[in-house]
Amino acid sequence: MIDEHARSRLIRRFGHDVTTWIDALPDLVATLTARWDLTLVEHVPGGTGATFLCTTAVLKVTPDHDVAALEARALTAWAGTPAMADLLDTDLARGALLLERITPGTPADEPTRVLPQLHDTANPAGFPPLGARVDFLFETLLTRRTGTYHATEHHLARKLAEDNVTPVLLHGDMHPGNVLQGPRGPVAIDPRAHAGDPAFDWMDFVHDGHDLHGADVDLDRVQEWLTAFKPFYG
């Protein structure tokens, strides 16, 4: 169902207890494909669970049902926005989302075009604050990846997250790999939505030297975020 690399990644992310979920994954996927009349094509690496490309849709499942619920809330908030993949259905009791399949689904030609649409079209009220995302990235993700807690940079990032900036609904995991080319142009996938500073979502694009297409973004704040997130780019 998933290869050893994907299995190891999930264990690093969730701990060894996740092996029970992994072992039950074939039965879970069989239940969901029957429910939604899906035909699996292939497993897609990455994410916080397992993602499967199907002939007519994309199936995502995760052992962290809170992650699935938050993504469903965000996709609902962005419903009708051309720059975000559509949510087709959910089974949150099983941590499952049924999503639009983006065709051709190749890397987007102009990935930065999605951000103004995402930041301008959804209400951030009620979503977790950006500080919570920052804490997870530094205290959990980065420490598991490097074995080191970067306290100084975490403090800088937390201060930026708490600055008095008009919040938007952030994608929260915005990088070129999460923007695919579709029939209506570039389309974002896999949000980790939080409410906060719009400059946060521009970090990877500025770091990689992308054209910002005249976007209304505070480049000084983006550079401050890049300084705080330097351990992620090392």
Image: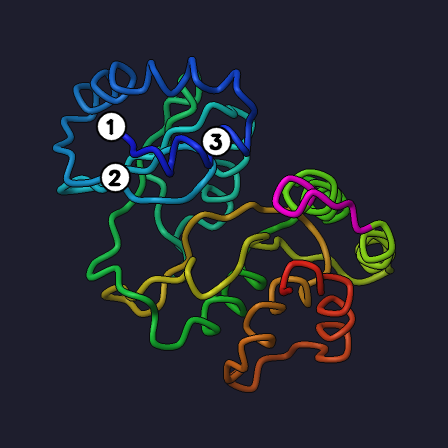
Question: How far apart are the alpha carbons under marks 2 and 3?
Answer: 18 Å
Instruction: Name the side, left or right, on which 32 lies relative to 82.
Output: left
Can residue 113 be seen in this snapshot? yes
Mark 3 residue crowding within 10 angstroms, few (<14) / some (14–19) / many (20+): many
Q: Mark 1 points at which residue?
A: 1
Judging depth in this view, the residue of 109 and 156 nearest the camera is: 156
Q: Nearer the viewer, mark 2 or mark 3?
A: 2
- First in sequence: mark 1 vs mark 2: 1
Residue 94, position in %: x, y?
40, 18
Instruction: Name the side, left or right, on which 205 lies relative to 59.
Output: right
Up-down: is 229 above or below 217? above
- Do callouts 1 and 2 mark residues in contact (Cβ within 8 Å)? yes
Q: Mark 3 points at which residue?
A: 68
Q: Residue at x 74, y 46 (%)?
A: 148
Instruction: Magenta stretch: give its range.
Output: 143-150
- First in sequence: mark 2 vs mark 3: 2
Q: Name the residue under label 2.
A: 43
